[in-house]
Image (spheres, rainbow, N blue to C red):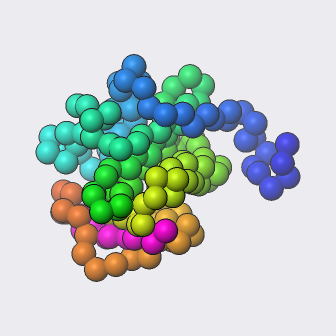
């Protein structure tokens, strides 16, 4: 066991793998559960990517723990060598255990390998822990933001690669 990790981390064997269509139900459940955990309801317009995740994203990964979808991260191609980080979600039992950092690193490594010049993201103001993670990876807040989600303003971040 790594002494820098929480002592019970070995219980959480987590694999980060490319998304496969047979995991669509688990991915959708993760998204809906996480939205509700933070006080949001699924929106048929904002969440239409759940109908066909493969078509919606240039790349999508899921974290598998105990055989179940426990986390996700995606990249949407915005054109001009810019990608948007999307669907960065993690079940609460795996938070603060380095899994979010691994998911984020997976997406950023892919973006770099695919010659991206920047990655953007938008997040709700109330997502303090997520914002800290993004900032620790070098993302900086920039003017603008995504469409409000149920009254919650969205903050826009960017990482130049």
**Residue drawn at the location 56% of the way across and 22% of the way down:** 67
**Residue drawn at the location 46% of the way across and 52% of the way down:** 114
Residue 103: in magenta span: no
- Which residue range is magenta in the image? 152-161
Left or right side of 41 for 106: right
Is residue 115 at all visible to an observer of this figure? yes
- When asked about the image quadrant of residue 25, the answer is top left
**Residue drawn at the location 19% of the way across and 63% of the way down:** 148
Q: Quadrant of the N terminus?
A: top right
Give percent across and percent down for residue 69: 48, 30
Q: Is residue 114 above or below residue 25?
A: below
Q: Is residue 35 above or below residue 54?
A: below
Residue 159: in magenta span: yes
Left or right side of 12 for 154: left
Q: Is residue 107 above or below residue 71?
A: below
Task: Tally the marks.
Answer: 0
Is residue 87 at all visible to an observer of this figure? no
Residue that protrudes farthest toward the top in the picture: 22
Give percent across and percent down for residue 74: 40, 46
Give percent across and percent down for residue 3: 85, 52
**Residue drawn at the location 39% of the way across and 19% of the way down:** 22
Residue that protrudes farthest toward the left in the picture: 45
Q: Is residue 58 above or below residue 55?
A: below
- When asked about the image quadrant of residue 119, the answer is bottom left
* Dominant SS in magenta: strand
- When asked about the image quadrant of residue 118, the answer is bottom left
Left or right side of 2 for 41: left
């Amino acid at each position: 066991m790594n002494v820098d990790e929480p002592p019970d981390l070995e219980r959480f064997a987590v694999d980060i793998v490319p998304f496969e269509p047979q995991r669509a139900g688990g991915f959708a459940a993760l998204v809906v559960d996480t939205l509700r955990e933070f006080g949001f309801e699924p929106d048929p317009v904002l969440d239409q990517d759940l109908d066909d995740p493969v078509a919606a994203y240039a790349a999508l990964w899921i974290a598998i723990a105990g055989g179940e979808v426990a986390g996700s991260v995606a990249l949407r191609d915005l054109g001009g060598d810019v990608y948007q980080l999307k669907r960065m979600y993690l079940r609460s039992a795996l938070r603060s255990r380095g899994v979010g950092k691994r998911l984020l690193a997976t997406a950023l490594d892919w973006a770099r390998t695919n010659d991206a010049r920047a990655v953007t993201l938008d997040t709700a103001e109330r997502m303090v822990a997520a914002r800290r993670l993004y900032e620790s990876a070098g993302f900086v807040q920039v003017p603008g933001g995504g469409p409000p989600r149920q009254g919650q303003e969205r903050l826009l971040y960017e990482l130049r690669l």
